[in-house]
Image: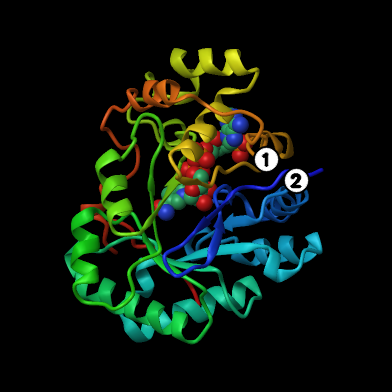
Amino acid sequence: MTASAPLITLNNGVEMPALGLGVFQSPPAETVGAVEAAIAGGYRLVDTAAAYGNEREVGEGIRRSGIDRGEVFITTKLWISDYGYEQALIGFDGCLRRLGLDYVDLFLLHHPVPSDFDGTVAAYKAAEQMLADGRARAIGVSNFSERHIENLIGQTEVMPAVNQVELHPFFTQQALRAFHAANGIVSQAWSPLGGVNRYRPADASDVKNPLEHPTIVELASKYGKTSAQVVLRWHLEHGVSAIPKSVKPHRIAENFDVFDFTLTPDEVAAIDALDTGIRGGPDPELINTELYPFKVEN
Ligand code: NDP
């Protein structure tokens, strides 16, 4: 029997699988097959974004898989070139059109734009409209700090259901996770396997790869699992949703084969202790359209 991921109930009652497939940097030509392989292997969550350039292929992969639309949870994200209220509505329409769907399960703002936070707030208000119209079942944010969320919720109505942030054994986001828990926001891990440290290393001669850390390698050996499986299990033990990316069918399967073992509280704590406090991705305070001039064509 194909295993299924545990479900996390979002703050509006919508259920989201805890484990899904990410497709950042998945080339469009490989994305259809990756999504099909994931669905066939039991995945029911796919995470894409307007900026990834593969929403069409995600939609195509889902259609080709033959699964009922209602059985799969699709997340996409509005890019910062589409912030502001009217532009965000156009951007959200573009996402749905490219995906070939009439609703998504989760719409996220991809980043805060702290230097133009009014535009960010206006985009979130457009997301609230999408929610009210039934074109999104839940809405949330990505890469927001505690301060960004406080600023946002002071000016809007709907508490974000999810904040998707960099989160892995070398960047555990303990304080932000506690803030999320206190506010009913689900923490979702991007680069759950520490991928950003490998494809965007701060120092190419000294790549900080959690999959090679002795603590994780030893646990993998103890359980007869791989390092990636131990790390994904660690996310699940924390109640964190994880969206590992792969375009390789054997890794897509490997990353979902994590429901037949558990880590003890001491083992979870041993992985927690690997935190370096150093993020691999960009500082959310610095995101704006000058740093990222890329524009999504709607
Ligand atoms: P991950 O931690 O998921 O790592 C992905 C990398 O690890 C890829 O190079 C992949 O290569 C490789 N990999 C996958 N599985 C394994 C395995 N079992 N063993 C060894 N290597 C493996 O990093 P990502 O940054 O891709 O994050 C995952 C997802 O999070 C993204 O796809 C995207 O959906 C989301 N994301 C969101 C961001 C945001 O700003 N909101 C930013 C970044 C990511 P290969 O494909 O060759 O297998």
- From this view, report whether residue 87 is shown above or below residue 237: below
Is residue 215 or residue 15 the one in the foreground?
15
Say which residue label 1 marks: 252
Occupied quadrant, residue 129: bottom left
Query: Residue at point 73% right, 39% down?
Result: 249
* Residue neighbourhood size for the residue with mark 1, other residues' Cα within 10 Å, grouped as few (<14), some (14–19), many (≥20): many
Q: Give residue 98's position: percent from left, percent from top.
A: 61, 73
Q: Give residue 269's position: percent from left, percent from top.
A: 37, 25
Q: Give residue 66's position: percent from left, percent from top.
A: 81, 64
* Residue neighbourhood size for the residue with mark 2, other residues' Cα within 10 Å, grouped as few (<14), some (14–19), many (≥20): some
Query: Residue at point 45% right, 34% down?
Result: 194
Q: Identity of the amino acid at label 1?
A: Ile
Residue 264 shown left or right of residue 284 in the figure: right
Occupied quadrant, residue 86: bottom left
Whole-angstrom CA distance, mark 1 to mark 2, is: 8 Å
What kind of element bears circle 1? Answer: helix
Q: Identity of the amino acid at label 2?
A: Gly
Specify the label residue 41 is tagged with.
2
Residue 2 shown left or right of residue 284 in the figure: right
